[in-house]
C-alpha cells in the first residue's frame, strides 16, 4: 500500500517533474492508474470503457461485449492538411476523399484508427478551416476475460465523477476516440520517480496483480477474488 501511495503521488504531481518537452497531463495518469489499481481492469478494458458502461446507482462497471461507435477528430499537421486539401480540390462533399488503392498509405500517414474504413471517408469529413479530419467507425469489441460487473469503490467513484465527459470514452485520446497513448511509458516514469523496486520492468498488468494481492492480504477469500478478476479457472488467480 505504501508503494501504491508513492506511485499515485508521483502521478498526481507529474507536471512538476516531467521532461521539459513533455505535454502537461494534470492528474490524468493518477486517474488512470487509480482505476487500474482499484478495479483490476486490463489495459484494453480501460481504454474501451465508456460512460454507458458505468452504473453509478448500483456502483458497478459493466465489462461486456458491445458495439462501439467511435468518432475521431484528427488534428492535422500543415503538410498533411495541404496534401488533403489537394485531394479534395474540385470534389463534391459527398465524394470519397481517398482512393482505395492508397488507403493503407493514408492510414499510416495520418495515424487513423485501425477500424476506420479509409476508402469510405468523404470530402465532407475534412475541415480545412479547423485543420481537422473527422472519421467514424463501428465495430464489436469484447473483453479478453469473462464478462461481468466490477464493483466501484469510493476511490474509483471519486475519480470517475471528477472527469469531464468530452467523449463517449472515459479516457479518450486527444482526438476523442480510443486512447492509444503509451501508458506503460508513463507508468515506468512514475514508478522510477517513486523509487519502486524494478521500476524499469513494471507492466500495466502488474497493477491488476496489485489489485488481487491487496485483496488477498486483507483476507478476502480466493473464490471472491477470482470472481472480481473474472477468471475462468482459480489457477489463474493463484499466479
Image (cartoon, helix red, strand yellow):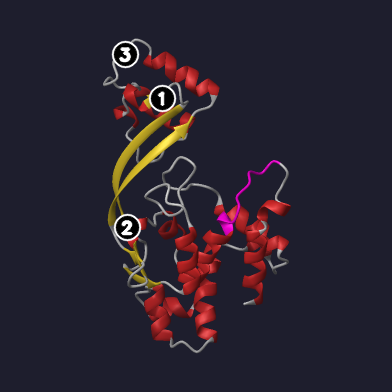
Q: Name the residue under label 3.
A: 91
Between circles 1 and 3, the one closer to the viewer is: 1
Say which residue appears at 34% left-offset and 75% top-offset: 232
Secondary structure at numbered mark 2: helix
Eyeballing the image, is 143 above or below 113?
A: below
The image shows residue 209 at horizontal and vertical percentages of 52, 72
Q: Please report the bounds of the magenta region as a residue range.
A: 21-29
Looking at the image, residue 180 sits to the left or right of residue 29; the answer is left
Say which residue appears at 43% left-offset and 85% top-offset: 222
Q: In which quarter of the image is the N terminus?
A: bottom right
Looking at the image, residue 67 sits to the left or right of residue 78; the answer is left
Residue 6 appears in the rendering: yes
Q: Main secondary structure of the magenta part?
A: loop
Say which residue appears at 50% left-offset and 63% top-offset: 159
Q: Name the residue under label 1.
A: 127
Between circles 2 and 3, the one closer to the viewer is: 2
Q: How far apart are marks 2 and 1 (CA)?
A: 29 Å
Eyeballing the image, is 231 above or below 87?
A: below
Q: Mark 2 points at which residue?
A: 52
Amino acid at each position: 500500500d505504501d508503494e501504491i501511495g508513492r506511485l499515485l503521488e508521483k502521478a498526481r504531481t507529474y507536471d512538476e517533474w516531467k521532461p521539459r518537452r513533455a505535454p502537461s497531463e494534470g492528474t490524468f495518469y493518477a486517474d488512470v492508474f487509480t482505476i487500474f489499481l482499484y478495479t483490476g481492469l486490463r489495459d484494453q478494458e480501460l481504454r474501451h470503457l465508456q460512460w454507458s458502461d458505468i452504473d453509478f446507482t448500483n456502483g458497478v462497471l459493466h465489462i461486456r461485449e458491445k458495439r462501439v461507435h467511435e468518432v475521431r477528430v484528427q488534428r492535422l499537421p500543415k503538410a498533411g492538411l495541404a496534401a488533403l486539401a489537394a485531394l479534395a480540390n474540385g470534389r463534391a462533399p459527398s465524394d470519397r476523399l481517398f482512393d482505395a488503392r492508397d488507403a493503407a498509405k493514408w492510414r499510416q500517414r495520418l495515424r487513423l484508427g485501425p477500424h476506420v474504413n479509409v476508402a469510405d471517408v468523404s470530402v465532407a469529413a475534412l475541415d480545412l478551416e479547423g485543420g481537422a479530419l473527422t472519421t467514424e467507425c463501428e465495430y464489436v469489441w469484447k473483453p479478453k476475460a469473462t464478462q461481468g460487473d466490477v464493483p466501484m469503490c469510493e476511490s474509483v467513484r471519486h475519480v470517475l465523477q471528477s472527469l469531464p465527459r468530452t467523449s463517449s470514452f472515459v479516457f479518450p485520446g486527444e482526438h476523442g476516440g480510443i486512447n492509444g497513448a503509451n501508458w506503460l511509458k508513463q507508468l515506468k516514469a512514475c514508478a522510477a520517480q517513486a523509487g519502486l523496486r524494478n521500476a524499469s520492468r513494471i507492466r500495466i498488468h502488474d497493477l491488476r496483480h496489485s489489485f488481487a494481492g491487496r485483496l488477498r492480504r486483507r483476507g478476502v477469500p480466493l473464490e471472491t477474488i477470482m470472481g472480481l478478476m473474472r477468471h475462468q479457472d482459480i489457477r489463474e488467480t493463484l499466479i
